[in-house]
Amino acid sequence: MTPGSEGTSLPALFYDAECPMCTRSARFIRRRDRRAAVRFVALMSDEGRALLASEPDLANVDSMIWVDRAGPGAERKVRTHSAAVLAVANYLGGGWALLGALARVVPTTWRDRVYRWVARHRPRAEHCEI
């Protein structure tokens, strides 16, 4: 079953489980997920590889991917880079949604440039911590 197909619950956060920063981010989100609805999926898992294979635009993405639906019965929506971070902030609500709304005033190209720089310089580990 591919991510986003019928029977697969959304939202889902696909992340690099070999990256300590990504793992800490996933834990941070899990602790603040009041609905307890987000699924956390390692990119190197079977489901993660299936997502990457199903979306050609994801070929070079090795960090955070947020997958959800705009509404019941809607197509799945896949967000990467800073758009994924802002979608997570919106999902968490409260002050996080407010911070995300403020961050949206920054042009996407600038936000993504910063996101890619951080992703390029993040530490790596040899095992999944979650």
Image (cartoon, rainbow, N blue to C red):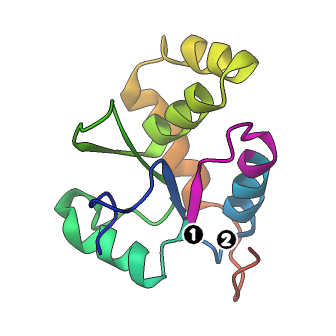
Task: Count neighbours of disc 2 (C-alpha within 10 A) and say few if under 14, some if 14 to 19, many if 20 or more.
Answer: many
Quadrant location, the C terminus: bottom right
* Picture layout, residue 59 above or below residue 64: below
Dividing the picture into quarters, in which one does residue 125 lie?
A: bottom right
Q: How many marks?
A: 2
**Local secondary structure at mark 1:** loop
Residue at x-position 18% and y-position 63%: 56
At x 48%, y 41%, the residue is 84
Q: Position of residue 50 (x, y in %)?
A: 31, 76
Q: Position of residue 17 (x, y in %)?
A: 63, 73
Frontmost residue, 95 versus 34: 34
Q: Which mark is residue 85?
A: none
**Which image quarter is the N terminus in?**
bottom left
Query: Disc 1 marks which residue?
Result: 16
Disc 2: which residue:
19
Name the amino acid type tagged 1: Asp
Q: Is residue 23 above or below residue 50?
A: above
Q: Which range of residues does the magenta coloring cover?
A: 29-40
Q: Are marks 2 and 1 in contact (CB under 8 Å)?
A: yes
Is residue 121 shown to the viewer in this render?
yes
Mark 1 residue crowding within 10 angstroms, few (<14) / some (14–19) / many (20+): many
Q: Amino acid at mark 2?
A: Cys
Q: Position of residue 79 (x, y in %)?
A: 38, 43
Image: 95 above or below 114: above
- Identify which residue is drawn at 53% across, 43% down: 115
Considering depth in this image, is 117 or 8 the residue closer to the camera? Answer: 8
